[in-house]
């Protein structure tokens, strides 16, 4: 039996693959609404592009790349969206402002996003477009689960709403 990384890579490169769910993983559906079918199709390609890069990276190496290494691996369109790394003073100010409800969460940095992606509890299983909606099939390793880094990726693609459907 293939390990999960091999299986995910296989499904990304051959979407018609009828793999059996890997043991210990559970299917979930994420429904994402866009302004148009064209936007939904473009988002599907972009999410697959990033998922494939991550799957190739996991498959080919034992250690997780540092932020500087990701700059050479991730697509440029994604890299251009990250906030520069925060200084210690900026982080302290952000924390104080969040505690005082003066600001929401800070913008994602490449380092922060890549760390979340390394610790993610979901894996790609499939995706399709239905009109202006992108329907993603993901696998999770337990409940509850978070998809923060996936939501960020979908929001970058123009998502109007994102919801997990059971």
Image (tube, helix red, strand yellow):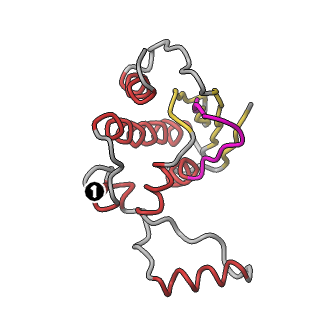
Q: Which residues are magenta?
A: 136-148
> 10 Å neighbourhood of mark 1: few (<14), some, or many (≥20)?
few
The secondary element bearing badge 1 is classed as helix
Q: Position of residue 18 (x, y in %)?
A: 49, 12
Is residue 108 a member of the stretch shown in magenta? no
**Quarter location, residue 72:** bottom left
- Height in image: 149 above or below 133? below
Q: Residue furthest front?
A: 62
Screen quadrant of the C terminus = top right
| Figure label count | 1
Screen quadrant of the N terminus = top left
Q: Residue furthest left?
A: 72
- Height in image: 13 above or below 47? above
Q: Position of residue 143 (x, y in %)?
A: 71, 38
Is residue 143 a member of the stretch shown in magenta? yes
Q: Residue at x 41, y 27 (%)?
A: 12
For mark 1, what is the residue? 69
Q: Is residue 164 left or right of residue 141?
A: right
Q: Is residue 125 left or right of residue 45?
A: right
Q: Residue at x 33, y 58 (%)?
A: 66
- Height in image: 109 above or below 49? below
Q: Position of residue 103 (x, y in %)?
A: 66, 78
Q: Residue at x 67, y 48 (%)?
A: 161
Q: Position of residue 113 (x, y in %)?
A: 47, 58
């Amino acid at each position: 039996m293939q390990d999960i990384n091999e299986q995910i890579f296989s499904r990304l490169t051959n979407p018609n693959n009828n793999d059996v769910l890997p043991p210990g993983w559970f299917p979930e559906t994420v429904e994402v609404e866009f302004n148009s079918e064209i936007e939904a199709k473009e988002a599907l390609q972009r999410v697959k592009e990033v998922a494939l890069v991550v799957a190739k990276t996991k498959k080919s190496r034992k250690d997780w790349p540092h932020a500087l290494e990701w700059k050479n691996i991730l697509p440029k369109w994604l890299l251009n969206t990250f906030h520069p790394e925060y200084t210690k003073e900026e982080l302290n100010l952000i924390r104080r402002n969040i505690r005082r409800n003066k600001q929401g969460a800070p913008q994602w940095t490449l380092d922060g996003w890549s760390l979340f992606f390394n610790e993610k509890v979901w894996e790609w299983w499939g995706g399709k477009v239905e009109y202006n909606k992108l329907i993603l099939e993901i696998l999770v390793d337990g409940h509850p689960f978070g998809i923060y880094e996936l939501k960020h990726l979908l929001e970058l693609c123009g998502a109007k709403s994102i919801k997990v459907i059971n």
